[in-house]
Image: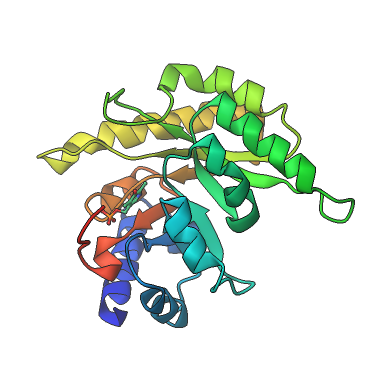
Amino acid sequence: MSANIKHVRERIAEAAHTAQREPSEVTLVAVSKTKPLEMIQIAYNLGIRHFGENRVQEALSKIEVFHPADLIWHMIGHLQTNKARKVVSAFDIVQSVDSLHLARTLDRLLAEEATDQEPGRLPILLEVNVASEASKTGVTLTDIPDLARQVATLPHLEIRGLMTVAPQVEDLEEVRPVFRALHEARDHLRDEILGPTCTELSMGMTNDYVIAIEEGATIVRIGRAIFGARAYT
Ligand SMILES: *Cc1c(COP(=O)(O)O)cnc(C)c1O
């Protein structure tokens, strides 16, 4: 795993330089879904501090036993509102907010848990289905401004940016316009609606993270290139 992480970090640095960006502008989230806790601990000992999971139950079994203070757990999968309570208590950031209903549920649960010392603001990203694929969750590009305006009124959530999963394509270059569109949508949100805290662009996975970084990704979510292939998804 050490060689995998080194390789990924090198490619992140190269892609950043190609785009005249600093490698430190890109956060590497290691996607540990389906992988055992031991592998997460190895990655942590190799310097990884951000981990992503897409299933609540599976994630909780890991987070409850392994949550050092400097480890950030990212929820990256579609979330049913009946599991939202567990998510707000375990995860540090939810990247997959894809409806007002989910946002309101998270906000209400956070309000219940908030104290004066810890007002409880959860960083979130809005998940966008850029290519409007029927098989995917996420809001369309057109719906982002309205959703963002409404979510921005919820006191316990903070929209930090946008997230997308690019379509599966044969020619990798076909994902570039998707990433570019998300970048433009983030800029518009930041400049016209939300202000300077809306900085994140979570895009790029094992197959396409180099292109994503060239197109401005600030967060890449990488599973297989770090942990190896998965038996199931
Ligand atoms: C599984 C998953 C990833 C990581 O995919 P790899 O191809 O293994 O890098 C990234 N983002 C989301 C939302 C995922 O579900």
Residue visible at 60% across and 74% down in the picture: 68
- Viewport quadrant of the N terminus: bottom left
Q: Position of residue 136 (x, y in %)?
A: 31, 31
Residue visible at 25% across and 64% down in the picture: 225
Work out whether residue 114 can be spotted.
yes
Front-most of 190 and 103? 103
Residue visible at 42% across and 51% down in the picture: 55
Q: How many marks?
A: 0
**Image vertical order of residue 23 relative to residue 101, above or below:** below
Front-most of 132 and 108? 108
**Image vertical order of residue 212 relative to residue 38, above or below:** above
Question: Which picture quadrant has residue 134?
Answer: top left
Query: As drawn, is 45 to the left or to the right of 146?
Result: left
Q: For the view shown, which residue lies furthest in the left direction?
A: 170
Residue visible at 22% across and 56% down in the picture: 232
**Image vertical order of residue 178 relative to residue 65, above or below:** above
Q: Position of residue 206 (x, y in %)?
A: 26, 56
Question: Which picture quadrant has residue 29?
Answer: bottom left
Query: As drawn, is 38 to the left or to the right of 7?
Result: right
Work out whether residue 22 can be spotted.
no
**Image vertical order of residue 59 relative to residue 68, above or below:** above
